[in-house]
Amino acid sequence: MDKKFVISIDLGGTKILTALLSDDNQIIDRVKIPTDISKGPLYLVERIANSVSELFEKTKITEDYIRVICLGVPGTVNPFTGVIGNAPNLWIASFNIKEELQKYFNIPVLIENDVNLAALGIKRFEFHDQVNNMLVVFVGTGIGGALIFNGKLYRGSSFFAGEIGHMKVSQKGEFSTDPKNLTFENLASRLAIVENIRRDIKKGKKTILAENENSKNKIKSKMLAAAVAGGDKVAQKHLGRACKIIGSVLGSLVTLLNVDTIVIGGGVVEAMGDFMMPKIISSLNSVVLPEPGREVKVISTMLGDDAALYGGIGLADEFLT
């Protein structure tokens, strides 16, 4: 039987996005459900399996036509064993998610870091494999990264490469009262931006986001985008500060790695790219050394959330051919 489809799953801190892709690289359909980590990793695996089953029911396609299931996880992942070393936003450590998910299906299951998966998708479908040294950064609930060196995904000696969100980027208490938390994602992710906005709300600063805070609605990227577009000074201040940090970190990484391309994605940038990208690039240019700075191209991904979904095709080709 011709196995012409790939199932790609992007497991995020807030959502599980599951898609069916055809052999001509088209997304046929998708299912999106909330991530629920309240009952532990086995329940999370059950929800992932349920999202795949819902996709089967929705598309009327059976396992017989599926080549592989590819799962992207926000954390350190050994793609050969399927073990999640640490996924802080999911409260998971030392857990073989591949083994557990495989119990639900008679289809090969592959596991990869979510931003690594996105980098594979961007490399193939935005650059048609014509990119040599690339850094991919996704800014969302946290901040993740991936590295392409000499056209190949670089996973590192212990599959930790690209975890830029956990880099210490400041020794000052300007953004956090806890010096242990002065990491890139604790300063510039959506959660960090929202926390800083909340502090201003508690101080009595005027912002249209106070209404969301008071109603206990979570401040999501779309709400931030609406506030920024509406000229909200508090939202603009904290988004601008995050952009400055992001650009500064990326500028230092360009000096270190001499990559030719940086691709930025994630829910925050997707919602506010017009506001954020010029500020990020300006901050990067103020930090990077001239020689590597002249060579680097900085863009936002055109694939958006679909980057990791398309990456499933690249992962399947790597491990199944």
Image (tube, rainbow, N blue to C red):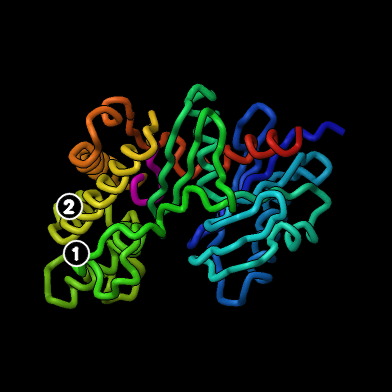
86 above or below 263?
Answer: below
Q: Amino acid at mark 2?
A: Gly
**Residue 201 appears at what percent x and percent y?**
18, 73
- Quarter of the picture holding the N terminus: top right
Range of the magenta residues?
263-269
- The residue closer to the viewer here, 190 or 284, is 284
- Quarter of the picture holding the C terminus: top right
- Residue 102 horizontal side relative to residue 166, left or right: right
Tag 1 secondary structure? loop
Q: Measuring 66% from the left and 50% from the top, which residue is drawn there? A: 79
Q: Is residue 231 visible?
A: yes
2 and 1 marks in contact (CB < 8 Å) = yes
Q: Is residue 220 visible?
A: no
214 above or below 266?
Answer: below
- Name the residue carrying label 1: 208
Any magenta on residue 267? yes
Q: Measuring 84% from the left and 42% from the top, which residue is drawn there? A: 64
Residue count near mark 2 (Cα–Cα under 10 Å), binned few <14, some 14–19, many ≥20: few
- Name the residue carrying label 2: 230
